[in-house]
Image: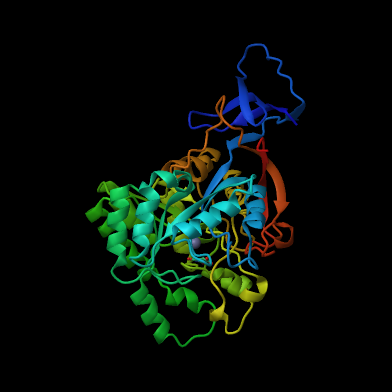
Amino acid sequence: MTSLLIRGGTVVRPTGDERADILIHEGTIREIYVRTTGPQKLLAADQTIEANGQLLFPGFVDCHVHFREPGMEQKGTMETESQSAVAGGVTTVCDMPNTNPPTVSITALKEKVRIAEGITACDIRFFFGVTQTEHLPELRRLWTEQGLVTLRNRCCGVKLYLDHSTGNQKAAKGVMEEVFHTCAELNIPLVVHCEDPVLNARAAKLNTREDIAAHSAIRAPESEQRAITTAIELAKKTGTHLHIAHLSTKRGVQLIGQAKKDGVAVTCEVAPHHLFLSTEDYETIGTFGKMNPPLRTPDHCEALWEGIEKGVVDCIASDHAPHTPEEKQVTPALAAPSGVPGTETMIPLLLTVAAGRWPHPRRRAFQPKLMYIDIRRLCFDNPNRIFSLGQTMIEQDTSANLVLVQPEEEWELKGAQLHSKCGWTPYEGWHVTGKPTVVGRW
Ligand code: DOR
Ligand code: ZN
């Protein structure tokens, strides 16, 4: 295929929707003909898609995924998880460093970039992890050496874990402040997993329960809140651009909202599972609902939606973290690994809300305010800006990286039909409205 015409799509833009015909030639947008009241310009191509008002977005960005390669290929590979992302309308992802080996050295990053170069459908960027002081000179070399510029361009920031999760990447004592200083000096966005290790360890020690819901009690809201407070203090002190990963609590929203008002350079993201699931779902999904930070009570979910409405939340990112069903279904329940897949279901779930429906089949109808332009802002414009990803916005002479959305199409989420290697979803059987299809990227 050399040329493609998308006729009569509705381009969702910050400046307002625009009905347009888009001509793509060899992967580049050659012409955008905006339909006004004048006569229709006749554009021709080898292939035509009649969009009939379907929505056109730039390929979505998921700025928080765990694609598992290298080292955990039984859960997923860059190839399989990229297919999952693209099937969900996501064409750029930022992969976390908790692989095996972890991405804490230039050598490890090089190997990941080498694997990613074989994947064309999805643009995979990588976070560099720091758990020990020895990793900081590597980071400095990566960011300053001329010969490493190609590698640096694939690196979207630094990730810091304040407590253990999959891959045991908790930063060693005393490393945290140094990481903040280094990121401030080198002007690197710093993503922090905010859970307090002392509070978590104490609660785990005191815990006597074995049911899966105990996970939410052990890693309690206070743990996230304390860690967010610490991280914001360090951001204030050092001037680092702090990005808080998977914000999950009411108080966390308030703390970040206040820090923003105070002029601290802080941004944050929320994961779909914290927006659509709650502790009430343990009853039906059991250990498949175990993740870090854990599911919260419904009042927290509502506060996160409010944070989106008020503009405190900058991004929605999936924290796509596949584990095999065998790994998840263990006894005792609390021994199950944490994490859920989500990169393929994120956009459909959000489209459902924008279509005026609530996809959860059991939880009471709840109608947050979310428009299509908000999805673009949260899952494209903001992550693209925060992590300097350089993706283009549907403009002439830029590479064609588009998602066509059929906003009224209703379909059912089924783990077996999704593309992640893990083969399951916590949203099994949910009905969603809105189907994304990636076009123009080949
Ligand atoms: O639930 C989670 N899963 N939280 C994390 O922090 C890591 C992730 C994973 O890699 O499985
Ligand atoms: Zn994560």
The quarter in which the C terminus is drawn is top right
Q: At 42% from the left edge and 82% from the top edge, which residue is drawn?
A: 204
Comparing 80 with 155, the one in front is 155
Q: Residue furthest right?
A: 46
Instruction: Indicate how the structure is coloured in the image.
Output: rainbow
Q: Residue furthest bottom?
A: 208
Q: Residue furthest front?
A: 147
Q: At 48% from the left edge and 28% from the top edge, which residue is drawn?
A: 15
Q: Looking at the picture, how far across and down is residue 242, in whole percent?
A: 34, 53
Q: Looking at the picture, how far across and down is residue 371, in whole percent?
A: 53, 41
Comparing 128 with 299, the one in front is 128
Q: At 51% from the left edge and 29% from the top edge, which residue is drawn?
A: 16
Total number of numbered discs in the rendering: 0
Comparing 122 with 264, the one in front is 122
Q: Quadrant of residue 57?
A: top right
Vertical comparison of 416 with 434: above or below? below
Q: Quadrant of residue 77?
A: bottom right
Q: Is residue 329 left or right of residue 293?
A: right
Vertical comparison of 367 with 175: above or below? above
Q: Looking at the picture, how far across and down is residue 31, in whole percent?
A: 62, 21
Residue 367 seen in the current view: yes
Q: At 66% from the left edge and 65% from the top edge, which residue is drawn?
A: 422
The quarter in which the N terminus is drawn is top right
Residue 406 seen in the current view: no
Comparing 384 with 149, the one in front is 149
Q: Looking at the picture, how far across and down is residue 332, in whole percent?
A: 57, 84
